[in-house]
Image (cartoon, rainbow, N blue to C red):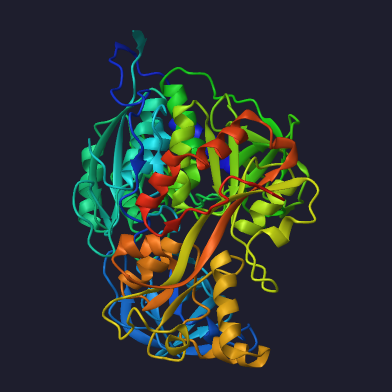
Amino acid sequence: MPVDEAKHKFHNAIKPKPLGVENVPISEALGRVLTEDMIAGIDIPPFDRSIRDGYAVVASDTFYADEVNPIRLILNKEKIIPGIPPKTEIRKGFCSEIATGAIVPRGANAIVMIEDTDIEGKEVVMFKPVVPGEYIMHAGSDIMTGEVIARQDGIISARETATLSTQGIQTLKVYKKPVIAVISTGDEIVEPGRKLREGEIYDTNSRAISDLLIEHGCIPKFLSIAKDDYKEIKSALDDSLKYDMVLISGGTSKGTGDICIKVIEDMKDSEIIVHGVAMKPGKPVILARIGKKPVIGLPGFPTSAVIAFHQFALPIIRCMTAQPAESKDQIRAKASLRIHSPKGLQEFCLVNLVKRGNSEVFSAYPITKSSGSITTFSYADGILEIPENQEMIEKDSYIKITPMSNTIKPSDLNIIGSQCVGLEPCLHMLRKKGITSKVMHVGSMSGLEAARRQESDISPTHLLDEKTGTYNIPFIKNEKNLVLVKGYKRRQGILYRKDTWIKPDTKLSEIVYDKKLRIINRNQGSGTRVLFDLLLKNIGKSEEEFEKIKQEINGYNRESKSHNAVAASIATLKADWGIGIESVALMYGLGFISLRDEEYDFCIPKIKFKTPAVQEFIKIIKSDEFKDKLLQLGGFMISSDIGREFPF
């Protein structure tokens, strides 16, 4: 059902109105100021997880599948469900059934959606190909260990508390506030404070939804985490009916374990008003009533749940609290790149906003993390609504953005480019001087493009030129409008699990030919992947031999988008080795063999080079205090020309 039609139908069925008047206290946490940086202690997600119901496969098995000539794979007996570590490795020619949110088994590098398959006996017939990494959310792709997830001196809002909950962290005559029941569901969901077992994740939705309710004048009543069990969910719903409204998250779709719809249907005097809305994210939302109580089934993925809350719960809540319909001024911006949208779905695309050059024009950067990422919501500045009949927005076309709040305060520094934990001491020192920063991790090449468009103030980069063996300088030496400021060095090398035969003095040429060892590779376009391919070319001596080596490396096409995700895959036995920086090897207790010291520098638009914030950044990276803090992290080295401008 279209979004507006679903809203109208739900509102007419519920007929919400104010609930009365009362005196209320102020919330304890929201609106307070943090006194220290909050650092991620675990990766989110802590394992590679499926984001679709379907089959875990080796992607290359499906490359030539189509409707006319489908491919057939032998179905393993094991059914992989959330919260249970898989036991069966996926070999070529085989596949395993997998549910959304479940751990991706060893050997698999893609998920085929169940809609693109049929079952025939002991075989799965597949009609569409998938590429490596498709429908997989990799470990650490959302939040990486050591990453700052809430900053010192920041005012806490639902965005910060939602992100913090992923780490398991504990710690007026007005209209009466609606008391709203909050229920989380899922076999893999556990309460904060308990140590995670493999396959489990902390309950994020209850914290995010509860604090959104507080922000909008409600009193949340978190009831429980219900397992994917009919009796548990039924019991939780029975308990919730004494409150003014019920929000239950997870289990709203039609996959394995999604039983909320059945429980609601079976409740006395219940009515399913809408199940499924033509929107992305948030399509499987349930809009229902039990008696006169509104009941909303929110999707399990955090961003989907938050979007669905804003679209369907908030209009009802504002009527209950006697507030006018929410109104936010829209911001005119330019699309920073071409944006594709699925046909037939109204998409709510979350974006970051940055100023372009010295003009008042904003550029909108879509946040490309999946709806399973809490930071998709927590880092966003605004929402781009794309109509269901529009499939593409061209780069540089004008668009309208609805801000996440009524005021947007641009950061003093927009840092767009390659990610590095070594930047955190600098950002901390900038905040002490009252300089705010927005950091977007888009990779070195995309960061360079942002600098050319004058959208970034600083673009960190570590691009290696294959012809000269030189970092960064060859990529901007002919650019009249860019400046390169030299930074520091990071040690790149082989990360390996210490229970393999690999030793500290083992050579790369020895490892790549061992087919029993499985690699987890970096994504194409990353600086680490460029370095790895260059090293392989040096081993092969010819283009033909290079291609042969790539084909022989076990897992070469299985990609991961961060150093932390590589380390996590190795540490959790999904892979045996990979290429990454030394600091993550230290974090995960992995072995490390140094291959090369890479140069991590900063590309700056010339028009912004003399701004006070940029000059303060350069001053800090040249300081002894920053250098000392960088060295304490491990795996970093100080260049003699740090802070110098190219050409010198």
* 170 sits left or right of 80 in the view: left
Q: Is residue 383 above or below residue 359?
A: below
The quadrant holding residue 158 is top left
Q: Position of residue 65 (x, y in %)?
A: 60, 85
- Residue at left offset 60%, top offset 26%: 328
Question: Could you tell me how many numbered marks the image carries?
Answer: 0
The quadrant holding residue 404 is top right
The quadrant holding residue 398 is top right
Q: Position of residue 587 (x, y in %)?
A: 32, 60
**Camera-nearest residue between 69 and 150:** 150
* 460 sits left or right of 575 in the view: right
- Residue at left offset 65%, top offset 40%: 457
Q: Position of residue 13 (x, y in %)?
A: 46, 34
- Residue at left offset 74%, top offset 41%: 606
Residue 351 visible in the displayed image: no
**Camera-nearest residue between 269 and 528:** 528
- Residue at left offset 56%, top offset 87%: 539
Q: Is residue 234 above or below residue 381?
A: below
* 78 sits left or right of 159 in the view: left
Q: Position of residue 262 (x, y in %)?
A: 34, 56
Please identify the residue farthest to the top as the structure is shown: 173
Q: Is residue 449 above or below residue 325?
A: below
**Camera-nearest residue between 436 and 258:** 436
Residue 207 visible in the displayed image: yes
Q: Is residue 140 above or below residue 22?
A: below
